[in-house]
Image (spheres, rainbow, N blue to C red):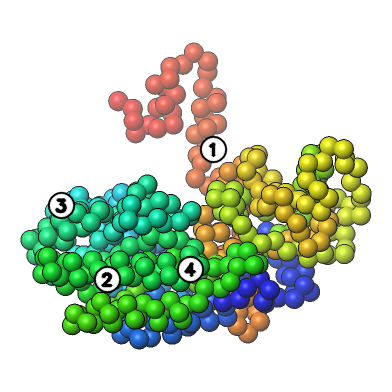
Amino acid sequence: MPKISDFPYSDAQVLDLAKQFPTPFHLYHEETIRKTVRGLNEAFSWCPGYKNHFAVKATPNPHIMQVLKEEGCGADCSSMAELVLSERMGLKGEDIMFTSNNTPLKEYQKAKELGAIVNLDDISHIDFLHGDGLPELVSFRYNPGPSRTGNVLIGDPKEAKFGTTSEQLLEGYRRCKELGVKRFGLHAMVVSNCLKVEELLETARMLFNLVLIMKDQLGITIELVNLGGGFGIPYRPDEKVIDVQAVGSGIHQIYKDMIQAKGLQVRIVTECGRYITGPAGLLISRVTHRKKIYKNYVGLDACMANLMRPGMYNAYHHITIVPNGEQVPGLPDRNQEMPDNSKDLISKTGIYDVVGGLCENNDKFAVDRALNADPRPGDVAVIHDSGAHGHSMGFNYNGKPRSAEYLYRCDGSVLRIRRAETLEDIFSTVDFAAAQTLNSVQNGQSLSHTRAVIWPEDEG
């Protein structure tokens, strides 16, 4: 997995890509994705049947999923759309794990239709699902509550809406056994974007201990343990890449001490998403404006609608400015000097807030950030590590169309894997004719008559 210092594109390539393709756009590096998956598979090669169920929510694009499928990944799904996308990519059966919460029956039905591993978030779902038939293999998501601290992204476990308590876990397995379920799994996701090996080892130790408890107290054999995702990536330049080999070997030792020592065998899976595609993705944008009031602002043609994490979580994404050196048509004069406002300036010279164009003050990619160059209109701003939870968390506030996605192939070619949205895409779900009919209704007509014009099926 590359660090920012191992950036796989030259400045000339970045400028050329920004000239070829309208900014902003997301760009993924195929070779990085493949190498990362292979490293993860190697770290767990000691465990027969190991598979990473890629968290589809991270980067739900069929081209990315095809690359991952070729490298042996399954899918971790949490919604109907993710189940259908996995199905269309040829994944089925226990290559899919369905981990949802507050789940509609139709989504459970789809998961069972595909033969997916169903991971229940709450024991009340047992009877809810029993009426429609429990699946062959049932898993439960465990929430350790106050016994674990979690981290800033996933939150304090006792404040999290996910999973069951230890008492509920025992009751859930007991109830499923009574109802005839023969195969069982176990799952937990306690930390997110974790760079500490020991924290991931503790998750394995916690789950293996539960495997032993279920065997001793209920006579139930847990055949599958999903360690969750949580493998982190170094968003900041000074952070180190997590030693995934140390994670794998450390879990192997715990497995031998706790599981093999009891004569048991458990298949290990993970559901890493961010770790796989996060460092392989960039958001390529252009500097559009500069503004000096009480702070120095750099405006981009990308906004929070293209990458929500900084505005939503105050998450750090490194930003590199690639100077263009040429005037870009339609943008302000790149050589225009800004007025001196030093007497009012809060931030020091050379310190910037990097912002988008949404009518929201949290539409910021960086606050009080030192950049590698003084940004000028037309320069390219590269926002790093946006390959997971970037495009997938996009939205259309202010009518902003979501950006295109491109895949930089191993052979050096660039493939468009999703076109940019247009205004027609955004307006396609709106009935303009009905709106115009409403506006033409004469003054004084009743609300019920107006509603009948728009929703005639409601009349009567």
Mark 3 or mark 4: whose residue is earlier in sequence: 3
Label 2 vs label 1: CA separation? 57 Å
Q: Are marks 2 and 1 in contact (CB under 8 Å)?
A: no
Query: Looking at the image, which residue sits at the far top?
Result: 444
Residue 283 at x, y percent in the picture: 64, 62
Residue 407 visible in the snapshot: no
- Type of amino acid at the residue the image marks with label 3: Asp
Mark 2 or mark 1: whose residue is earlier in sequence: 2
Q: Identify the mark at residue 208; answer none if there is no mark.
A: 2
Q: Residues within 10 Å of mark 4 (few under 14, many from 20)?
A: some
Label 2 vs label 3: CA separation? 27 Å
Q: Residues within 10 Å of mark 3 (few under 14, many from 20)?
A: some
Residue 154 at x, y percent in the picture: 44, 55
Residue toward you, 253 or 305: 253
User: Quick check: 376 above or below 273?
Assistant: above
Label 3 vs label 1: CA separation? 44 Å
Q: Which residue carries the number 1 mark?
A: 432
Q: Residue at x 83, y 37 (%)?
A: 344
Q: Residues within 10 Å of mark 2 (few under 14, many from 20)?
A: many
Residue 398 at x, y percent in the picture: 61, 42
Mark 3 or mark 1: whose residue is earlier in sequence: 3
Q: Identify the mark at residue 127; answer none if there is no mark.
A: 3
Q: Is residue 456 left or right of residue 288?
A: left
Label 2 vs label 4: CA separation? 19 Å
Mark 2 or mark 4: whose residue is earlier in sequence: 4
Q: Residue at x 75, y 76 (%)?
A: 10
Viewer-side label of 3, 1: 3
Viewer-side label of 2, 1: 2
- Type of amino acid at the residue the image marks with label 4: Lys
Q: Which residue carries the number 4 mark?
A: 196
Q: Is residue 437 left or right of residue 219?
A: right
